Amino acid sequence: MSGRTSITLLSVGHSCVDVYQGAVAALVPFLVAERGYGYAAVSGVVLAASLLSSVAQPLFGALTDRWPLPWLLPVSTLVGGAGIALCGLDDAYGPTLAWVALSGVGVAAYHPESARVARAVARGSGHRGMAWFSLGGNLGFAAAPLLVAGVVGLGGLRLSPLLLLPALAGALLCLPVLRELARQRAAGAGPVERTGRDDRAAFVRLSLAVVCRSIAFTGLSTFLSLYATQRLGGGSAAGTAALVVLYAGGAVGSVLGGALAERWGRVAVSRWSYLVAAVAVAGVLVVPGPGLYGCVALTSAGLYVPFSLQVTLGQDYLPSRIGTASGITLGLTVSIGGLASPLIGGLADATSLRTALVPLVAMPLLSWALFRTLPEPVLPEPTGAEAGS
């Protein structure tokens, strides 16, 4: 199996996992409509998905640094899907939080090992392989509002078990890749890995930048559907459309980021993208009418151009701990943005939703400032077969 085929399968499998991250925000309007949850309550649902995921991702990353665990890919995919599939069956708030939290654990287990495998099957090549892998996750996010609207919007939360279907597909898709990696390992022809000295200070600054990005993106994705409905009217369709634009713009941004980085470097491209994102987030709050959708698209592109670049930057700043780096840059610092959602929701309950979203404008600016302090890693030459690939 070629590296391109493996990356394609992993990318599609990634979309089948990240559809469940996007599904949490997509379920928010239905939880409000069917169960009467307020802003703070739905923020708690997002927090439940984020909290355990945030804690678990670096732990899974550390485990995969010591012991390759490729079986985590299908198992974690199924766990992530099962949590979302079951959250609609019990009207009580506690069980809903528990099932969503279980989904977060599945997502947490998936990302560090999948990023290690993706870097391996891409033969350690540049940024495009990781960009295409990240594209799959972004498409999963983009598909989530449509999937949830098609299932829950038509039949209510009682049909949520149908949302398990993407997880079943994703678990099956990763199996050929794992068999190919096992075959290469047995033949002594596994992909190469890079070595070098860890730059922990740069990695910490990178992680803080991704945390700021995460707060901006998660805050928008949690409340954008409700915000667009308030601003534009048109019922839930306006909110669903805004979420689709937010997630689909990310798909374009992640692929564009890989291409731009090969010409201008990952740090420079990420830095300018965050400036664009800051202006665009402000536009979401002030531009009237349907122009909101254009600002959402630009926000999404600005926040997602650096997405896959940050993953490979983290791996290159910590070459001896690729699993840990992936768990943090692709997982912990992405999901940790959900920890800020209850604060936004509480402020929205006390003031207005628009007022509560204003602090998000500062988050891309902080990411830009942190990226100004980061060096572009100088990559050493590949030195051998990747352990456990």
Image (tube, rainbow, N blue to C red):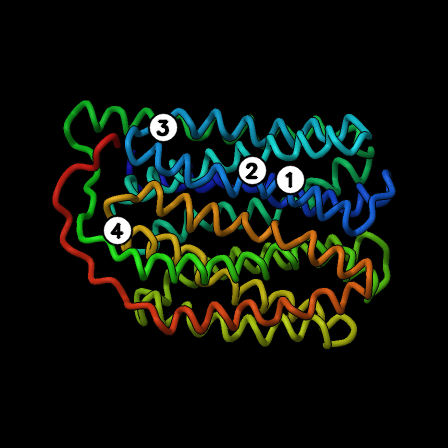
Instruction: Identify residue for label 2.
Output: 52
Q: Nearer the viewer, residue 252 or 20?
A: 20
Amino acid residing under circle 4: Ser
Q: Does label 4 or label 2 sit earlier along the sequence?
A: 2
Q: Nearer the viewer, residue 345 or 304?
A: 345
Amino acid residing under circle 2: Leu
| Label 2 to label 3: alpha-carbon separation | 21 Å
Do the residues under discs 2 and 1 have CB atoms within 8 angstroms? Answer: yes
Is residue 316 left or right of 60 when viewed as pictured? left
Q: Residue at image x 50%, y 57%?
A: 211
Q: Residue at image x 63%, y 55%?
A: 340
Give the percent coordinates (x, y) of residue 338: 61, 50
Amino acid residing under circle 3: Pro
Instruction: Identify residue for label 3.
Output: 70
Question: Judging from the image, what secondary structure is the residue with disc 2 in?
Answer: helix
Quarter of the N terminus within the rendering: top left
Task: Name which quarter of the figure residue 291 lies in.
Answer: bottom right
